[in-house]
Image: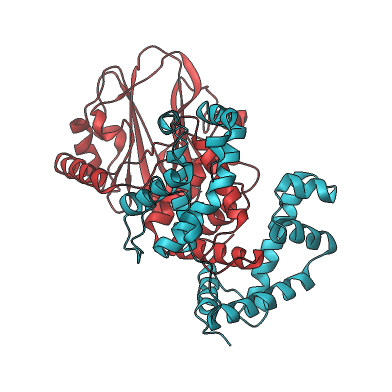
Chain colours: A cyan, B red
Amino acid sequence: MTLLVKNRPLLRAFRDGEEWALRQVFREYAPKVARYARWNFEMSEVDVSETTQLTFMRVFSDKARSRYDGLRPFLSYVLRTAHNVAVNELNRAWRRRESIPSEADDDWFDRIPADAATPEKALFDAERQRLISALLEALAPLEKAVFEKRFVEALGQEAAASALGLSRQRVRTLEQRIRRKALTIFKTSGHLPRGTTAAMVSALVESLLIGGLS
Amino acid sequence: MSRNTLIRGWLDGKLSRRREEALWEKVRQDPVVRRDLEATLRLESMLCGYEAGEISHLELERIEERVLRSVDGTAPAEPHTVKSWVIAFSAATAALLLLPMLWWLKDSRPSEVRRGDIPAELFAPRGSAAPYETHLFVFCVDDRDADVAAHRLDRPGGDAAADQCPLQAELQFAFTNLGETYSYLYVFGVDDTGRRLWYFPKPVQGESLALQTEVSEVLLGDSIILDVNHRAGSVRVAAVFSSEPLRDDEIADAATALRDPAAVPGELLDGTGRYVESFVMKIIDEGDAP
C-alpha cells in the first residue's frame, strides 16, 4: 500500500519516469484500480479496462508524477484519480456506490468486500469448468502448458517462456491459438451455431452471467 | 481495419499505438464494437478463472503496455469531456455554417505508412513512358495481413476504370514536383453521393498547401484511415498544382459541379499557372470477415 512512500529510490525513479519504476507501480496498483472500478461503479470489463488505462495515463503524466509528494498514501491518490476518470471523463450512467476514497485513508481499499457465493456465481463457475475442460481436451500438450502458465498461473510472457524453454514470441503465438480454440469451442460445442459472431458469443457469456443457460 | 481485426489485434498485443487509439475510439462511439470487445474480454477472464466482471491479468498486461507507450509525452487521445464537447460542438457549428458539407478527413494520428512500405516500382509512370514532372500519387495501403500491401489508385484519364481499395485499408498520398512552377497543391474529392471530401489542405487552413519543389516521390501527410470518413462507392479525386495558392471558395464551386459525373475537373479548375490531375477510385467494403 505504501510502495512509493517507503521506497525512496523507487519514488525518485518514478518521478523521473523510468520505465522499470512505472511498471512496478502499475503492477502494484492497477489490479486495485480495476477492482475498485468494478466494485464502486459496477462497471463492465470494457469500462474497467478503459478506466484503468485512463487513470494510469493521468497518474503517469509528467505533471502528475512531479506533483506527487511521496508523503500521501499513493493508493488513495490513484483511486481518487480513478473515481474522477469514471465520473468526469467517462461520464456514463453508472450504478455506483457513493464511496470516494479518502485522501488519508489507505486502508479504505481493504474494506471492499470479496465476492459472495451466490447461485449465479455457482452456475458461472460450473460453466467455466465445462468450457475449460473442453478447451483442455482440444489443446496440444505445448498449448496446454502455455495455458497453465499464462492463463492459470498468471505468469508474464517472459517468465512463461523461460519456464517452458520457449521464446517469448512462441508463447505469444501459442496464446493466440489458445484464444482461437476457446472461441471455436464456444461456437462448436453446442452452445452456439457455426458461423456465430463475436456478438453471439457476447450473448452466450451474458447468459452465463445471469444464469440463463442450463 | 475491421472491428474484429482490431479486437483480435488488441487481444494478441499486436496493435500499433495508432490502431489502439482507433480501437478505443470505436469502443466509445460504437456499441457493437463495445459489445464484442466486452464478450471477448469476458471469455478471456473466464478462462483465466476470474470472477464475472473482473478483467484478467492478460488485459492488465495490455493496458500496461498501452499506458507505458503513452508516457513519452504522446498520450493517446482521451475521451471527450463535457467541457470539450461544448467546445467541439461550438467549433463544429461554426464550421458547418462556414463550410457546408464539411468532411474532415485527416485524423491527428501520426502516419504509419513509411516510404519503404511502398515499392519503388509503384512510382513508375502509368500510361506513359515519360517520367513524371509533376504528379500526385495515391496509394491504397492495406496492412491487415502481416505484410503491408500497397497499390496505386491514380490511374490516368480521370474517369477511366476505377482502381479499387478496401474500406478497411488506408490512403497514402505522395507527390513528385520536379520543376519550380508549382508551389501549392489542393487535393479534394467528391464521392458518388455528391459529398465533398477534404484531403489537403485542412478545412480550417483556407487555402492550398505549400508544396516543396524540385523533389520526387515524397509522401504527403499522414495516411488516411478510410473507414473513418469514407463509404463504399466511387470517389473522384482532383489535385490542383498551382503557382499561387487557391482559396477554398475557388474550389467550392468546382466541388459542387463535380457532383455531375459528366463534369471534367481539368476544365472546371483550369487556369494560368495551374496543373490539374484527376482520377476515380473505387472503395469496396470487404466487411468484417477476417
In the displayed structure image, the side of residue B226 where residue A186 appears, left or right = right
| Residue B159 to residue B54: above or below | above
Residue lying farthest to the bottom in this orientation: A214
x and y percentages locating residue A31 in the rendered image: 55, 53
| Residue A31 to residue A133: above or below | above
Find residue B40 and report its image quarter: bottom right
Name the foreground residue: B63 vs A173.
Answer: B63
Find residue A24 and report its image quarter: top right
Can residue A79 be seen? yes
| Residue B241 to residue B45: above or below | above
x and y percentages locating residue A11 in the rendered image: 54, 31
User: At 74% from the left edge and 61% from the top edge, which residue is drawn?
Assistant: A147
User: At 36% from the left edge and 47% from the top edge, which residue is drawn?
Assistant: B79
User: At 20% from the left edge and 40% from the top edge, which residue is drawn?
Assistant: B91
| Residue B202 to residue B242: above or below | below
Tell how many labels.
Answer: 0
**Quadrant housing the C terminus of chain B:** bottom right
Residue lying farthest to the left in this orientation: B97
Name the foreground residue: B251 vs A203.
Answer: A203
x and y percentages locating residue B171 in the rendered image: 46, 40
Name the foreground residue: B161 vs B244.
Answer: B244
Can residue B155 be seen? no
In the displayed structure image, the side of residue B146 where residue A45 appears, left or right = left
